[in-house]
Amino acid sequence: MRKNILAPSILSADFKILGEQLKQTEEAGAQYIHFDVMDGDFVPSISFGMPVLASVKGATGQTLDVHLMVTEPVRYVKEFAACGADIITVHLEACEDLGKTLDAVHACGVKAGVSIRPGTSVEELIPYLERADMFLIMSVEPGFGGQPFMPEALKRISRVRELLEERGLDRDIEVDGGIYHSNVAEVLRAGANVIVSGSGVYKGDIRKNVAEFMEILKNYE
C-alpha cells in the first residue's frame, strides 16, 4: 500500500525559530521537510542553499526532500547530498541532460526526483518514468510561495499516475503549490501521495495544522 506523506515547506517557516518549528512538524507526524532551492536564474527568486540544509540536517530526523529550482543542477548534486539531502528533485526544463543528472543523484546514494512546471506536458516525463524515484507536479509556477492552486494540476497528476501504472511502476507523485486542508483530498484522489504545504503548515498553530493534514492523508491510504 502506497504511503501518503506530508512535506512541510520551510520556505514559509520563521527562520528565527526554524529549529523549534521543525521539531513541531516532526512531533506532529510530518515525515518529510521540503527544502526549496532557488537560484534567481531558473526562477526569479533566491532562497537558501547548502549551509542551511546542513543546519537543518542536524535539527531533525525527517527525510530532507530537496527541490532544486536551479539551472543545470548537476553542478550541485554532490554538495547537496553531502549536506544531508535524502531526495534531490531537479526540473526537467533546467537540465541539458536530465538522464545524466538523475544518474549523478543516484551515484550519491540518494533518491532522484523529476519536477515539471505547469506549462510542461506530462508526456515529457515518459522517458524517465523508470529512472526516477519521484515525480513532482508543480501546481503553481515555481519561484514564489503563497500562490493559489491551479485546478488543471489534478488532471496532470492523474495522467502521471496512469502512465506509471501502465508500466507497473510504483513511484511517488509529489505535488507542490497552494495546498491546504480544504483541497488536499482532491489532490490525493487524483493520485498524488507526497504533499508539500508551506503556508498550510506554518501559518497559525503548526502542530494542529500538521495533525489535521495527517488525519486527511491517513483517510486516503
Image (cartoon, helix red, strand yellow):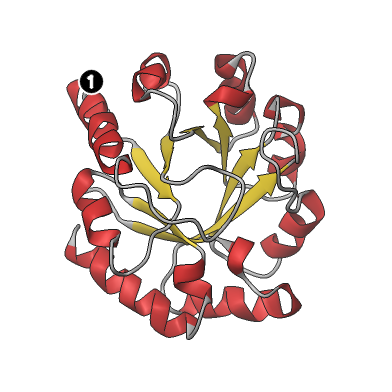
**Nearest to the observer: residue 53 or residue 96:** 96
Mark 1, Cα crowd under 10 Å, few <14 / some 14-19 / many 20+, is few
Rendered-image quadrant of the C terminus: bottom left
Instruction: Please report the residue visible at 56 percent of the width from the left and 43 percent of the height from the top.
Output: 142
Residue 159 in which image quadrant:
top left
What percent of the width, then of the height, locates residue 168?
Answer: 21, 25
Query: Measured along the vertical axis of the image, is residue 60 above or below residue 147?
Result: below
Q: Is residue 190 left or right of residue 70?
A: left
Query: Measured along the vertical axis of the image, is residue 184 above or below residue 74?
Result: below
Residue 56 in which image quadrant:
bottom right
Element under disc 1: loop
Residue 77 in which image quadrant:
top right
> Is any part of residue 44 visible from this angle?
yes
Instruction: Please report the residue visible at 28 percent of the width from the left and 68 percent of the height from the top.
Output: 182
What percent of the width, then of the height, locates residue 124?
Answer: 41, 18
Q: Residue furthest right?
A: 51
Q: Is residue 220 left or right of residue 201?
A: left
What percent of the width, then of the height, locates residue 194?
Answer: 38, 51
> Is any part of residue 130 visible from this angle?
no
Instruction: Please report the residue visible at 64 percent of the width from the left and 39 percent of the height from the top.
Output: 68
**Nearest to the observer: residue 44 or residue 32:** 44
Figure label count: 1
Q: Name the amino acid type tagged 1.
A: Arg
**Nearest to the observer: residue 32 or residue 12:** 12
Q: Which residue is mark 1?
A: 167
What percent of the width, then of the height, locates residue 80?
Answer: 72, 42
Instruction: Please report the residue visible at 64 percent of the width from the left and 81 percent of the height from the top.
Output: 20
**Nearest to the observer: residue 109 or residue 63:** 63
